[in-house]
Amino acid sequence: MKIAASIVLAATAAILSTPASAQFAKPEDAVKYRQSVMTVMSTHFGRIGAMANGKAPYDAKAAIDNAQIVAAMAKLPWPGFSADTEKVSVQNRAKPEVWSNAAKFKEDGDHLVSETGKLLAAAQTNSLDNLKTAFASTGKACKSCHDDFRKEAK
Ligand code: ASC
């Protein structure tokens, strides 16, 4: 069991440190992957939002379940923004600044990971007030990155 666990850990570490472009068979797949992650993240973040905004009854367990998914998803999309996707033909809304201002983009991504970690911790306190506060600050992290790095929808 310990050996199996360390193999999984080693494999995970290898995947996370693989150059981005090597992680997807083609750039189109990277775009599809990052968009899918964002869709799943938004779906589960939205369910927390419904509770935070009084549109759905507060359910502490559902909040935790949703926050776990959001926190896990927040870690994933970044390799999908590999350099070979900048000029990809598939429709997407990434601004050129993702690549021209990569340091800020990375900072914003790291900020999202940290905010979604706090969202999960807040959910785990079983307090709707804590959930509301963390939902608001996580939403700000989504929005500020979108403002800088995502084109308006047509
Ligand atoms: C969502 C979603 C976003 C963010 C953003 C927060 O649920 O799809 O893009 O929250 O609206 O301001």
Image (tube, rainbow, N blue to C red):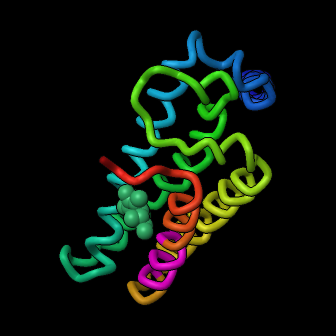
Q: Is residue 55 above or below residue 146?
A: below
Q: Residue at x 64, y 58 (%)?
A: 113
Dividing the picture into quarters, in which one does residue 42 lie? bottom left
- Determine the main secondary structure of the stretch shown in magenta: helix
Write down the quadrant of residue 59 in the picture.
bottom left
- In the picture, which quadrant includes the N terminus? top right
Q: Residue at x 47, y 73 (%)?
A: 123
**Of 73 and 6, the residue lying toward us:** 73
Residue 93: give x, y in percent of width and height: 45, 42
Looking at this view, name the residue that lies furthest to the bottom. Answer: 129
Q: How many marks?
A: 0
Residue 135 falls inside the magenta stretch: yes
Instruction: Say which residue appears at 66% left-offset and 19% top-offset.
Output: 23
Is 64 located above or below residue 94 in the figure? below
Residue bounds of the magenta highlight: 131-139
Whether 75 is among the magenta residues is: no
Q: Residue at x 52, y 42 (%)?
A: 94
Q: Quadrant of ligand 1?
A: bottom left
Q: Is residue 137 above or below residue 69?
A: below
- Residue 45 visible in the shown view: no
Residue 24's x, y, as percent? 60, 17
Residue 39 percent across, percent down from the top left: 37, 44
